[in-house]
Amino acid sequence: MKDIANAIGVSAPALKELFRRDILRRAFIKHPFFSDIFEAYKLDRRFGGFEEGTLIAKTTDGVKVVRGFPKIKRALTLYPTIKKHFDGEVAIEEKMNGYNVRVVKFGEKLYAITRGGFICPYTTEKVRLAFDDSFFKDYPNLMLCCEAVGEESPYVPSSIYGDRLDFYVFDIRDMKTNTALPIKEKERICENYGFKMATIFDIVDCRIAHEVVRDVVEKIGKEGREGVVIKDVEMKEPPIKYTTSQANCSDLSYGFRYFGEYGKDFLFSRLIREGFQSWEFREIEDVMNERALRIGKAILFSMVESIRDVKDNGKIYEKMRLRFYDLEVFELFKEHVRRMGVPAKFSDPIQDDDGSYIVHYYKYMKSTTDIVKHILEGNLWS
Amino acid sequence: MKDIANAIGVSAPALKELFRRDILRRAFIKHPFFSDIFEAYKLDRRFGGFEEGTLIAKTTDGVKVVRGFPKIKRALTLYPTIKKHFDGEVAIEEKMNGYNVRVVKFGEKLYAITRGGFICPYTTEKVRLAFDDSFFKDYPNLMLCCEAVGEESPYVPSSIYGDRLDFYVFDIRDMKTNTALPIKEKERICENYGFKMATIFDIVDCRIAHEVVRDVVEKIGKEGREGVVIKDVEMKEPPIKYTTSQANCSDLSYGFRYFGEYGKDFLFSRLIREGFQSWEFREIEDVMNERALRIGKAILFSMVESIRDVKDNGKIYEKMRLRFYDLEVFELFKEHVRRMGVPAKFSDPIQDDDGSYIVHYYKYMKSTTDIVKHILEGNLWS
């Protein structure tokens, strides 16, 4: 424990206090699949200059600190926001709709760390198939920050990127300092090692970026894609994100489907985004009506679907399709889900043509279920 | 102060504590217009069996306790809710879209108490013109619970009921015990004294009320009316309210116009109501699309209007038209608004044909203004 305390610069009693206050929590399950790790903890809150989601692991390579991926702030209007926050050139990069994964190498193997700082067995299995370790041998201090996308995602399933879980690098960062490589270097490395990369739509002067982003966002919105991240080409300034109306509405649809689980803040913020975008895009009435219908449908249809679900089936589940290449990893993932406190059930694995196993993962949405049930029983709303 | 303490059954030190904790607050402005009252306080929270909004007044008639109007709970589905909460016959009464006023007589004059327990000078002036005091002479212990409606409303302006503020009795209650007269007695008294009454659409067996309410709600919704209150004809059970989709959407429109002032709870609850109604009414896709468009427009158009307002005028105000019959009451109302902590400005009064004065009342929406301004300056959203 002394090594862990040292790694984040606190005394042993201070470390104890962090555990007691649940700021520091266990981040992995001891298992041969994770054989390079002896101990691993994650920061559940920002602490002492370390981001939320920072992982501290005692590995066969010694104690490693993997910094949490920094929160990216959002623009609600493109102008003058972009111009105000950057100087010179910015890259307009795709923000894909998946989950954030940091890929690192400890000892002999690769590990996938999710946003919160957990080492995820499901993602780790896929990362080991997707990446060989030549990059990590050449750059032992760097991590690949990727968006994990695809239908077969346990966290953010999306059908527009294909079935299987796939990884798109968007940042390459120093594990310990969180310094990100400039865009050009990132591109060069990804090309050299054959990594898929989040699309860079354009690199433009920040003074005209708002116009370019608008065009990009309107175009990719129609394709159901999520949005963009605007980055200083040197990666010296914090990036800014901006999303399409379709992504906002897809969030609304998901949020109202499980309205008991998703907070009012989650839903409210998406609506506010739509207001500022519609205003900034100077939409005429017809276009506003289209947007209004999209918003209204996202809200209404998903709520009604959930009410029907409770009426017909008694309970609401989110159903996801997963794929495992090794059934031992399936067992490990089930334990992982249990430890994360997610009430869930799983179907039996069915072997696919390539020998991998397909499993259905049902996440029980207790809060939405309880509210709807309470109302359908004829109880009043205070 | 001892009389006040006695009236709500607490000791003098306990009364002091209620003041200190802001549970008990001053409820009127000392002025000849309110000459029958020496002191008056209101409960800002439920306390010791007294509802929030209860008024305790030392008057020329002695100390009077005027019970707060009880909160009416809401049905999200009509079936089985109505059937579950009532026995026998229920009255289906119109819920008008105004503000709740209790009309009482203290000493020589009538007084209008708003929901929160304030004696409102604006409303009191209109109440004295609308009601003579014969009813109060005959029934000194009763109060008239009215909806104050009309365009010229300082709290809930609505154009569907005509320009001038008007009063519709919906309950007649014992001031001190809060016991409500049965529906038939209320009707008889209102007819005898010539009081306008909230429309009673029907009186039906509670087992079929859900069907009748649905028909009523669909019909009055199209007319832009708010909804219904379902009441036990004997008034022995607490009533239940239920609103039209148009009223929910009108709330949404208002709430998103001033989204900084109106909480997420306010907005979220209206959306949930729409979901349950759409489900219960078994809407086909076309009808759901209509509802979705109505919801989406209510949200989007009002937000964009507010953003435009800040862009063009720098500030967002809610503008209301008021009418005073006596300029002294205007002065008193300005003081009332100040004491309620509402940041507002007023136009100069302009005399109308009948000698009354028209005034424009501008309520400054600081929170929405600040948020929009912050975003338009190019700041990020965390």
Image (cartoon, coloured by chain):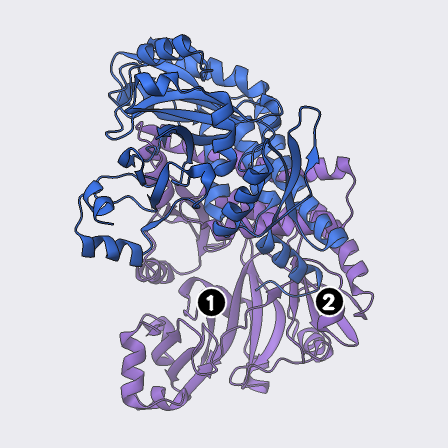
Chain colours: A purple, B blue
Residue A89, which numbered label? Answer: none
Q: CA distance from mark 1 to mark 2?
A: 29 Å
Report crowding for label 1: few under 14, some 14 to 19, many 20 or more residues within 10 A (C-alpha).
many
Q: To which chain does the residue with label 1 belong?
A: A
Residue B302 place in picture, x, y as percent: 65, 41
N-terminal-most mark, 1 or 2 = 2
For label 1, the residue is A114
**Looking at the picture, which amino acid does disc 2 mark?**
Ile
Q: Is residue B34 left or right of residue B61?
A: right
- Is residue A242 or residue B93 the one in the foreground? B93
Residue under the image location 61 percent in, 31 percent down:
B294
Residue at the disc numbered 2: A82
Q: Which of A324 and B162 lies nearest the eye of the viewer?
A: B162
- As displayed, is residue B292 above or below residue A345? above
Answer with the quarter of the image where residue A142 lies: bottom right
Q: Amino acid at mark 1?
A: Thr
Dot 2 falls on a residue whose secondary structure is helix
Image quadrant in which you'd find residue B362: top right
On the question of residue A191 being in view, the answer is yes
Vertical placement of B75 versus B366: above or below? above
Pair 1/2: label in front: 2
Give the chain of mark 2: A
Q: Is residue A91 above or below residue B283?
A: below
Horizontal side of residue A272 vs B304, given as left or right: left
- Residue B224: which quarter of the image? top right
Dot 1 and dot 2 within a common chain: yes
Q: Residues within 10 Å of mark 2 (few under 14, many from 20)?
A: many
Coordinates of residue B111 in the picture (x, y in percent): 41, 32
Q: Position of residue B303 (x, y in %)?
A: 65, 45
